[in-house]
Amino acid sequence: MRNPKRMDLFLLLRPLTAFVTRPTAVSAGVQGRGLNSCFRLRSAEKNGLGRLQRRHFSPLSIDAAANTMVKTRRFITVKRFEGEPKPSDLKLVEEELPPLKDGEFLCKAVWMSVDPYMRAYAPRVPLGMTMMGSQVAEIIESKNPKFKVGQNIVGYFGWQTYSISDGSESAKNGLEKPFIIPDFKGLPLSLALGVLGMPGNTAYFGFLELCQPKSGETVVVTGAAGAVGSIVGQIAKIKGCKVIGFAGTDEKCKWLTEDLKFDAAFNYKKTTVAEALKKAAPNGVDCYFDNVGGETSSEIIRHMNDYGRISVCGSISTYNATDIPKATVVQMPMISKQLKMEGFLVHRWSHRWEEGILQILQWIKEGKIKYNETVTEGFEKMPTAFINMLRGENVGKAVVKV
Ligand code: NDP
């Protein structure tokens, strides 16, 4: 049974329903063959807020003789996640795709992403739909001059191996449209899902725009060894800040201090925030990049200096919770220290997407940013990779090689 309290929470989080795709028939420009009806995502507002609508139309015509039949494999949700997701909550299905129509292209997934938002927004997705998600895919057939065979793109096609798109997601729905990957100058394409993609831009814009860090300030990052957090900390170092990270294992903390040059890192499972900050930030915290929420964040906020800035990026400590978790109220420190706290969705900066990616690419080339990927091999392992990422088994970005 769906927890009504949890639904209230996710109504607030509605914009990321934008990531949902429905593969049977047409969804947001992404196609698969199938039923007489489908779900289509449409944007009610120009800012990209998604609205789920049920629409009915005729099945796509299939002409087996017209094209070589391509079979796609995809994961659909068959059971609501309760607490930690289970492999049995998902089912792998296979189906043939229809021939291409004018304006469409066919692409083959090469790398798939597993991200925390897939857990956070899952309660809003009807059962039977393809698991939401982005992928790096190669265009293998095209009837769209803007998308050429051989080009690599990032697309929000969900957990499926082959997809048909008309490339117009953005125009139709305000969603992220398939994005042709720029020249990474020899770096792996998988980075388009991590440091040179959505998580990288989350770190770049979410930290710089909301925290407005100044040289010499003290910055705290939670989820520090993950895809977003590990980049936030390094950007903070580039900006001349003192950086303190919290992560879930000693090995991650060692990576943060030894390789990424964080000034200090603490295993939050072994040390309290108060103990850690007493030691590493005796003069208080100026900027907090919050990936985890919950009591950890309340405690960090209590240690902030006057006019401190908090960028609220995620709340992963609560995603698997079956009831809304409770944490110490933060209003008094916010008032007395005159703090500024702001949540964001990275797509706020869609219009500056390439700027963030090209800046991070340059920092990588200059040796100022390092990255790590935790790679799982095999499309059929998507559920395992997803569950492992939520458990904290990834260092840096969790990706799946199809
Ligand atoms: P990560 O690569 O950081 O992977 C998730 C990590 O979360 C795990 O490795 C684990 O690391 C940590 N974690 C799991 N459970 C808990 C817990 N109970 N308490 C603390 N940490 C936990 O994921 P991303 O970098 O992709 O995402 C980080 C955050 O940013 C998420 O909250 C995500 O929802 C958010 N996000 C927000 C966006 C936005 O637009 N606002 C865009 C992208 C991401 P550990 O071993 O340290 O526990």
Image (cartoon, grey):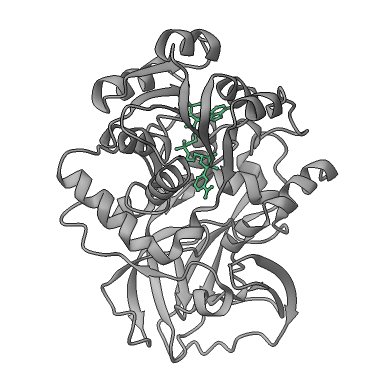
Q: Is residue 282 above or below residue 135?
A: above
Name which residue lies at 58% across and 74% down: 173
Q: Is residue 253 above or below residue 320?
A: above
In x, y percent, where is residue 114? 48, 46
Name which residue lies at 42% across and 35% down: 229
Number of numbered discs: 0
Residue 141 seen by the camera: yes
Q: Nearer the viewer, residue 368 or 198?
A: 368
Q: Quadrant of residue 349?
A: bottom left
In x, y percent, where is residue 386? 52, 41
Q: Quadrant of residue 88?
A: top right
In x, y percent, where is residue 108? 38, 67
Residue 79 seen by the camera: no
Q: Quadrant of the N terminus?
A: top right
Q: Is residue 304 above or below residue 188?
A: above
In x, y percent, where is residue 346? 49, 53
Q: Is residue 272 above or below residue 341?
A: above
Q: Nearer the viewer, residue 63 or 3?
A: 3
Q: Nearer the viewer, residue 38 or 301?
A: 301
